[in-house]
Amino acid sequence: MPYELENRLVVGVASSALFDLEESDAFFREHGEEAYRKYQDERIDDHLQPGVAFPFIQRLLSLNDLRDSINPLVEVIVLSKNDPSTGLRVLRSVKAHDLAISRAIFTQGRAPYEYIEALSMSLFLSGNRADVDSATKMGYPAGHVLPSTAVYDSADPSLRIAFDFDGVLGDDESERIYKESGDLKKYHDYETANQNRALIPGPLKNLLQDLNLIQKLEEEKHHKDKTYTSRLRISLVTARNAPAHERAIRSLAEWDVTVNDAFFLGGIEKSKVLEVMRPHIFFDDQTTHLEPASSYVAGVHIPYGVANEGSPTNTVDLLAPVAEIDYEQAPANDGHRGVSPQGGNR
């Protein structure tokens, strides 16, 4: 029988998000395609080091112990523009780091995000802004992993995930009202008048829904075994405040999703909360909220909605630009870690 992807959380991750490919990328840029192939082959057992999204993916996969190993809760699939031969080092690195990832797609220069819907993915993570922009325009749940120097305790088994609301969990209807009017009172009046009408779900609502299913299994396990402590904790961190908070809460209830914590900050810098929380991943539609927290949070930009209209493709907005590699000249291998974003398409 075929392996079904329903009833599990499926995440697609580019090697640019999972591993630190800065050195490989620099070699590619200097020496070109053929030398790059030889370089990767000679270092096939020189395992790549963790990248920005690694702690999130590692902890997410650890939740598979909540269900039988033949029917895992979480399926992570590598999506890469590398060809199969240059992708071998990535898969050997996956094995070396003991990540339970066995499936990968290598498309030799073609956009791998075209397979997001076919593979029932709730999230696609990449270090390449152009790919994420294109996937988002096609209606797919995609996020651009930004440079980060955050360090997490490897002995801590918990997984902390934080979401912005407008443009991430919900659509940009309300945000558009404020952006177009610039009038906070008009925005609050609009939200009060519509507080009982749920927003249309945004790009990552289904991800939250899938995460809630995992939390329900954790609750069941705790009910059977009082010594078990839930590992997955989900937080909402939004610039909304009263009275606009009510519509957000009612929207979550209407969508039948939940969060453990909600921070309605009303203009207080989100980094103040994120520094205390230290989520393993934080999704926001504006880099102005992500950049100040880059030293203690793995930030993911969701380039969706009015906040991103007119923003140039292939940029990290307030961060340094990400270069684009022409695969017709050489196999692109993007990747970054730390504060220096690297180019490429992997």
Image (cartoon, helix red, strand yellow):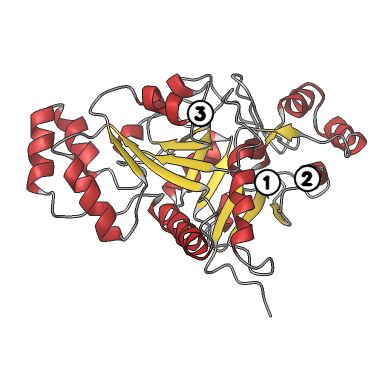
Badge number at residue 24: none
Residue under label 3? 297
The answer to whether residue 199 of the structure is visible from this angle is: no
Residue 286 % position (x, y): 38, 30
* Callout 2 touching callout 3 (CB < 8 Å): no
| Residue at the image point whose x is 49% and y is 41% from the top | 160
**Quadrant of the image for the N terminus?**
bottom right
Q: CA distance from mark 1 to mark 3?
A: 24 Å
Residue 302 % position (x, y): 43, 39
The answer to whether residue 50 of the structure is visible from this angle is: yes
Left or right of residue 12, residue 184 in this image: left
Labels 1, 3: front one:
3
Q: Secondary structure at mark 1?
A: strand
Labels 2, 3: front one:
3
The amino acid type found where label 3 is placed reads: Val
| Residue at the image point whose x is 66% and y is 39% from the top | 18
Q: Residues within 10 Å of mark 3 (few under 14, many from 20)?
A: many
Name, please, the residue furthest toward the right.
42
The amino acid type found where label 2 is placed reads: Gly
| Residue at the image point whose x is 20% and y is 41% from the top | 245
Q: Is residue 162 above or below residue 149?
A: below
Q: CA distance from mark 1 to mark 2?
A: 8 Å
Left or right of residue 174, residue 157 in this image: right
Residue under label 1? 80
Residue 86 % position (x, y): 81, 42
Q: Is residue 258 above or below residue 68?
A: above
